[in-house]
Image: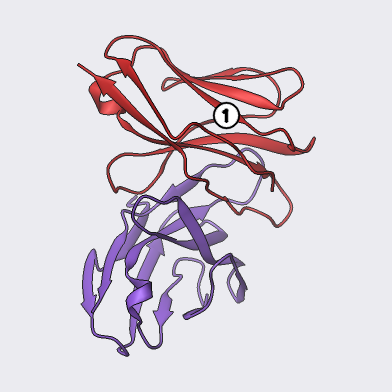
Chain colours: A red, B purple
């Protein structure tokens, strides 16, 4: 699975958009980009994933560059409850490999 | 539908003791895995299983054993606990197929003294 690079920490003001970048320059054509977050020391929580098209759900939007070497997770209106560590993961979907390889993630602090 | 359930939530062991961390899921997921998370670090894969009777090693398997006799359960065994195994342990399960997300348990906080 490809490795990812994320900034160790970021902050944003409550109510503003939080844009979390991720570099995955060695991503393969059959690898998806997944985002999870971990609030305090709870189990990681799935946010969103995509292959090459931009994706949106009730939690966030995922923007993947055309060359797929980087992506951005967007929380459109961050709240204090979005303070967490955010993990960007790339992995092959299908076959027998469902391993998630976590990096260090980005610690997002949402300020009041 | 409880999702992924881990027991116990907290455990203190003495060096050399053995114990089993339990993980159960009620979603009929084929794939299950165990991770450990040390302070300030990301999760590291210990062992995983793609179905009953099939297990394989992850990044940090030493000191841990697993078995998968049923689809629902995936216990993690520490045969002789060491202080280096002090960590938070997470179990996860995934449905095999395209576009699937992993579901995580709430973790077991283990301290080995």
Extreme residue toward the front, this view: A8
Name the residue at 50% across, 73% down: B70
Residue A33 found in image quarter: top right
Mark 1 element type: strand
Image quarter of residue B81? bottom left
Q: Looking at the image, is B29 positioned above or below residue B70? A: above
Give the vertical position of A103 relative to B10 (above or below): above
In depth, the one of B60 and A44 nearer the eye is B60
Q: Note whether A53 is above or below B87 in the view shown.
A: above
- Specify few, some or many for label 1: CA neighbours under 10 Å numbering under 14, 14-19, or 20 or more: many
The residue identified by callout 1 is A22
Image mark 1: chain = A
What's the residue at 37%, 59% (across, down)? B38
Farthest-out residue, top? A16
Question: Which quadrant of the rendered structure holds the C terminus of chain A?
Answer: top left
Q: Position of residue B42 (x, y in %)?
A: 45, 50
Q: Is residue B1 left or right of residue A49?
A: left
- Residue at the farthest right position: A29
> Residue B63: percent from the left, percent from the top?
47, 81
A39 left or right, relative to A54: left
Report the side of B54 relative to A110 (left or right): right
In the rendering, at what x and y percent does residue B14 appear? 24, 85
Where is residue A4 drawn, in percent x and y? 61, 39
Q: Is residue A75 left or right of residue B52?
A: left
The total number of labels drawn is 1
Q: Which residue lies at the image location 53% right of the left edge and 56% below the top edge?
A: B29
């Amino acid at each position: 699975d490809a490795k990812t690079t994320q900034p160790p920490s970021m902050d944003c003001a409550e109510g503003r958009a939080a844009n979390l970048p991720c570099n995955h320059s060695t991503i393969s054509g059959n690898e998806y980009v997944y985002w999870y977050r971990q609030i305090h020391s709870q189990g990681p929580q799935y946010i969103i994933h995509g292959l090459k098209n931009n994706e949106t759900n009730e939690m966030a939007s995922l923007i993947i560059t055309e060359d797929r070497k980087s992506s951005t997770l967007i929380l459109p209106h961050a709240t204090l409850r979005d303070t967490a560590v955010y993990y960007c993961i790339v992995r092959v979907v299908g076959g027998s490999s469902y391993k998630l390889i976590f990096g260090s993630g980005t610690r997002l602090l949402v300020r009041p | 539908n409880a999702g992924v359930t881990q027991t116990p939530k907290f455990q203190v062991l003495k060096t050399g003791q053995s114990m089993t961390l339990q993980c159960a899921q009620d979603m009929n997921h084929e794939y299950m895995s165990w991770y450990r998370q040390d302070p300030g670090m990301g999760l590291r894969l210990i062992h995983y299983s793609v179905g009953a009777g099939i297990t394989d090693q992850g990044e940090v398997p030493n000191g841990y054993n697993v078995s998968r006799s049923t689809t629902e359960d995936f216990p993690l065994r520490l045969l002789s606990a060491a202080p280096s195994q002090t960590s938070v342990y997470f179990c996860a399960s995934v449905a095999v197929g395209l576009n699937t997300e992993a579901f995580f348990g709430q973790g077991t906080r283990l301290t080995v003294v």
